Image: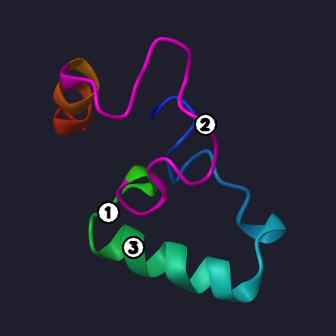
Amino acid sequence: CRNCHSYEAMDWHAQSLVAQRDMQKAMKEGKTCIDCHKGIAHTLPDGYESDSPVYEEDFAKL
């Protein structure tokens, strides 16, 4: 997930002012994109099911 989901990969200028504010707040709080957007921004990658124990183990490592 973090290959794409990182603050370094974000195009801050492409975001609305509200999104920029929220993302900067999350960054200061040590949150990741996944903390707020898990399962709502796009579908899970092939091979992952949200109720799968493997998925939960992978997610816990983030």
Pick out the residue farthest to the right: 14
Q: Residue 1: x, y in percent?
A: 46, 32
Where residue 2 is drawn, which disc sits there? none
Say what amino acid the circle numbered 3 marks. Answer: Ala
Q: Nearer the viewer, residue 37 or 14?
A: 37
Residue receiving disc 3: 26
User: Could you tell which of marks 3 and 1 lies nearer the N-terminus?
Assistant: 3
Q: Are marks 3 and 1 in contact (CB under 8 Å)?
A: yes
Label 3 and label 1: CA atoms lie apart by 5 Å
Where residue 43 is drawn, which disc sits there? 2
- Tell me if 59 is positioned left or right of 43 in this view: left
Q: What stretch of residues is rendered in magenta?
A: 35-53
Query: Mark 1, mark 2: which one is toward the viewer?
Result: 2
Indicate the quadrant where residue 28 lies: bottom left
Label 2 and label 3: CA atoms lie apart by 22 Å
The question of residue 50 being in magenta is answered with yes
User: Could you tell which of marks 2 and 3 lies nearer the N-terminus?
Assistant: 3
- Tell me if 48 is positioned left or right of 61 in this view: right
Relative to 20, residue 5 above or below: above
Residue receiving disc 1: 31
Around disc 2, counting alpha carbons within 10 Å, would you say few (fewer than 14), some (14 to 19), or many (20 or more)? few
Say what amino acid the circle numbered 1 marks. Answer: Lys
Position of the C terminus by quadrant: top left
SS type, badge 3:
helix
Residue positioned 40% across, 25% down in the render: 49
- Tell me if 50 is positioned left or right of 18 in this view: left
Residue positioned 37% across, 55% down in the render: 32
Around disc 1, counting alpha carbons within 10 Å, would you say few (fewer than 14), some (14 to 19), or many (20 or more)? few
